[in-house]
Image: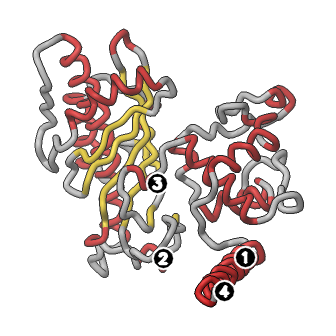
Amino acid sequence: MTIFKSFLSIFFVFLLALATTKAKAQEEGSLPMNGDISNGTRLYRVHCTVCHGFHGSGDGPARATLKKAPADHRNGSLMNARDDQMLLSTVLNGCHTRGCSKAMPAFGDGLNSLDAWDLVAYLRSLHMPLVNFFPKVSQYLVKQYHIGHLGNDDFKDGQMERLKKYAGRVSPQDLTKTIFPLFKADSRRPNPELVPQEPRRLARLKKADKLGYVLFMEMIGPRKRKVPIGLAIDRNYAIVKLVTTLDDPGQAGEYNRRLEKYVGMGKRGDAPKFKTGRAKVNRIFDKAVIRVYALAVEAANAFELEERERSWADDTF
């Protein structure tokens, strides 16, 4: 009986500590948490689908009444340009606090911070987060480049010559790329942090801590279909991960089985000569992957040029 009472005492102390932790998290509103996706799904259906749609693609019934189209929460480039703290702040305080549409209200009066974290967890489930590519990422940047418009004439001409050789004909839209350079500076950080474009913060990022780059792009699949993909390359430009972000599980599975063959291919300075087989479908995939890889490499080259120019004095890059 005494043992049973002792067990109960310990159990109640544990429950009290758990309740205290949750209460503190609600008060602080900024404690990084994994979140409950199931509850986040329910909250999203109640509060967000009228604008963002049932699947988060920005096609809710209220879209026709808005001057600015609601965000597509499935867009990896768009959503990863905001870290978890930014998403939490947007949910609680409204979109206008982050410079986006004033039409999105603040939900802080109706939701506590734990519910808000659940919404953040669900939002992350709608697109492919950066940790899916590099699990050790703790800090990252987001940059957008128009390839062929940065650097001296030799650098720009070199980019365009390589793209013509490996990517073929590219449109101005193809040349504009959003790239995420990822770093592992602090392993204790529970959520990846988007580092602001401030000189002091950028100076703390070290070349030795760089994991690689992630881009969300479109490849031309069989039958000329545009297929959304996520591509990760390491600091030496080898492919770390290449996956489609198609919604259809069957189609996604078939594409991913083929795309997995390219993991490990590619190297800084080498010509991208990817070959996975002699069949026609293999050749189609080889050509499509070489194209997106070439564009990704040139976006990474643009970032590294910019970083060398920024940090020439301290030689961090």
Mark positioned earlier in the residue sequence (2 or 3): 3
Q: Earlier in the sequence, mark 2 or mark 1?
A: 1
Q: Position of residue 304 (x, y in %)?
A: 31, 59
Residue 181 location, x and y as percent? 38, 58
Q: Name the mark on residue 143.
A: 3
90 horizontally vs 185: left or right: right
Task: Measuring from the top left, give residue 245's x and y in whole percent.
Answer: 45, 33
Q: Is residue 46 left or right of residue 183?
A: right
The amino acid on which the numbered mark 1 sits, given as a three-letter code, is Ala
User: Which residue is disc 4 drawn over?
Assistant: 5
Circle 4: residue type: Lys
Mark closer to the chain start, 4 or 1: 4
Gap between marks 2 and 1 measured at Cα: 36 Å
Q: Are marks 1 and 3 in contact (CB under 8 Å)?
A: no
Q: Secondary structure at mark 4?
A: helix
Q: Nearer the viewer, mark 2 or mark 1?
A: 1
**Eye-nearest disc, 3 or 4:** 4
Residue placed under numbered mark 2 in the picture: 201
Question: Rounded to the nearest whole Å, what is the CA distance between mark 4 and mark 1?
Answer: 21 Å
Indicate which disc, 3 or 4, sits on the residue closer to the N terminus.
4
Q: CA distance from mark 4 to mark 2?
A: 53 Å
Category of crowding for the residue at label 3, using alpha-carbon neighbours closer than 10 angstroms: few (below 14), some (14–19), many (at least 20): some
Q: Residues within 10 Å of mark 4 (few under 14, many from 20)?
A: few
Q: Residue 49 is drawn in which quadrant?
A: top right
Of residue 86 and residue 172, the one placed in the foreground of this image is: 86
Q: Is residue 238 left or right of residue 249?
A: left
- Quadrant placement of the C terminus: bottom left
